[in-house]
Amino acid sequence: MENKTADLTQQPVHNKRWLIMVAVFIATFMTSVEVTIVTTALPAIISELHGLAFQSWIMSAYLLTTAVTTPIYGKLADSMGRRNVFLWGVIVFTGGSFLSGLSPSILILVVARGIQGIGAGAVMPLTFTIIADNFSFKQRANVLAFNNTAWGLSALVGPLIGGFLVDRLSWHWVFFVNVPLGILVIALVLFGYHERKAFNSRLTIDWLGIVWLAIGLVGLLLAIQLLDTQPLYAAVLLVIAVFGVWQLVVQEHRFSDPLLSPAMFRSPTFSIQIVTATILSGVLIGYQVYFPIWLQSLYHVSATTAGLVVTSSSIMWLIASFFVGPLIAKFVPKRIAISLIGIMLVGYFCLIFAGRSFPVWAFYVIAMLNGTGMGIVISMNTVLSQHLVAPNMVGSATSILTLGRSLGQTVMAGLYGAILNLVIRLNLHDGIHFSQVNGVISSSQQTVVVHHLMIDQIILHGLHGVFISVVIILILVIVINWLDPNRKIIQ
């Protein structure tokens, strides 16, 4: 693969590397901030578009199309060149952002979010490849570290920007803000990035694997979405999803160049790193989405204030990630994971019993514990998953971990939404309708609603249902790490 990359790209001619790095940095910021900035605006979007029943799809559509298209673009980049595929991704992402901001209904917004994800599927993995193509091995570590600050910056300022735009303008600007950034990236790539590309006619793409992967993912997500309203259809879709995953496994074992190589999963410790990162990414999307909903709908704080809770988690994530190296050098990985996930579990256990008097500061504490735990554990998962495979499989291992994290967020976003809607519907009584609950889900809602206190209690029950599911999956991931056969410090 290394030779193929060298033959394909060579050293680009007349490249202005600082322009390329600015473009890559902005593109990384755009795709990563898209998740954190939208979560703060969700309550306003749900209320204005009357979309409580489909709210999970606002996140899931973006995450699903990103996950499915990522491995496709990785293969196409070998044939068409990094620049062309990257440029295509930025154009599609920018167009999807513009359409999202114009959306007059929840269904059109979901479609537009899916288009955004199709673009992000190209942008996210190729940022790392472009850096590798344009910088020597000695320079690469520093350049990657610089680019990683875009992820940290998006996590820090995303909720603040989202809250400010919702409070001062409207939720539409949460999507419009990425349009000028996308146009800037397109201009930088067109004028500053040139590439010698050679079309590889022998390129083999695991199209059947891609098809089975898409069938499995779409079937699973649709099943989760319909779980609370149409359980029969959900059961059928779940069977289709299981069949798709089974066929994917069969395909990957017999294809010469599979999307997801089975060879890497022969190490139980490696598999546990992937599963842990996948599940914890699902927990991550839980508090990013439902902490702001809780604070805005029940405590009626501003979108900006609610976004600060998520920001506190991001700050701790960045700080904690610096401790990963020393911890891995001194402790067995399973002990690190079990200890930190256990602390996170205590915080969520408190939430399932929390009432309307639960203090706002406690959400900051729980979010900060989450940021600390995930900053260490998920970073550790990344380092170990790369270390535990052969040198020629490091890239594949990293892509599998990235795909797992996307899937964790995608699946759990749908599952949380289904649980919230199901519990709310089960608790409707005394003439209270689902539309009334939808009407008070945002702190910006000015309409006077009858039975407001009872509706608040119904929303609270729904949120309890979401965090009960979080407690269950955290217990599950603790058990999985306990079963890790490795009992030694990995060196």
Image (tube, helix red, strand yellow):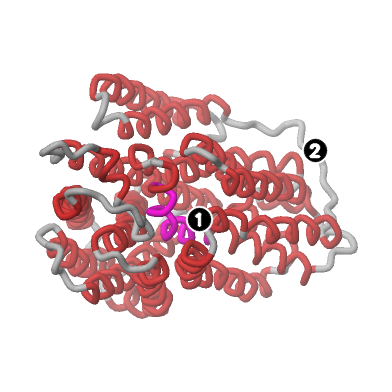
Q: Which residue is mark 2?
A: 199
Three-letter code for the amino acid on which mark 1 is drawn? Trp
Can you say whether 140 is above or below 97 in the image? below
Q: Residues within 10 Å of mark 1 (few under 14, many from 20)?
A: many
Residue at image location 24% in from the left, 19% down from the top: 232
Residue pictured at 35% horizontal, 46% vertical: 413
Region in magenta:
33-46
The stretch drawn in magenta includes residue 38: yes
Res 260 seen here: no
| 54 relative position to 79: left or right | left
Magenta: main secondary structure equals helix
The three-letter code of the residue at mark 2 reads Phe
Residue located 61% across and 69% down the image:
147
- Asked if residue 294 can be seen in this view, the reply is yes
Whether label 1 touches label 2, CB < 8 Å: no
Instruction: Point out which mark residue 303 bears.
Output: none
Q: How many marks?
A: 2
Residue at (85%, 64%) from the top-left corner? 15
The correct choice, above or below, for 199 with respect to 316 in the image is: above
Question: Is residue 71 one of those drawn in magenta?
Answer: no
Quarter in which the C terminus is drawn = bottom left
Q: Is label 2 in a helix, a strand or a loop?
A: loop
Q: Which element is circle 1 on?
A: loop
Q: CA distance from mark 1 to mark 2?
A: 43 Å
Q: In the displayed structure, does residue 96 sit left or right of residue 34?
A: right
Q: State the residue in front, 165 or 396.
A: 165
Whole-percent x, y for residue 425 in the image: 19, 37
Q: Estimate the x, y position of residue 323 in percent, counting from the top left.
A: 37, 79
* Residue 326: percent from left, percent from top: 36, 80
The residue singled out by tag 1 in the image is 171
Residue mark closest to the camera, 1 vs 2: 1
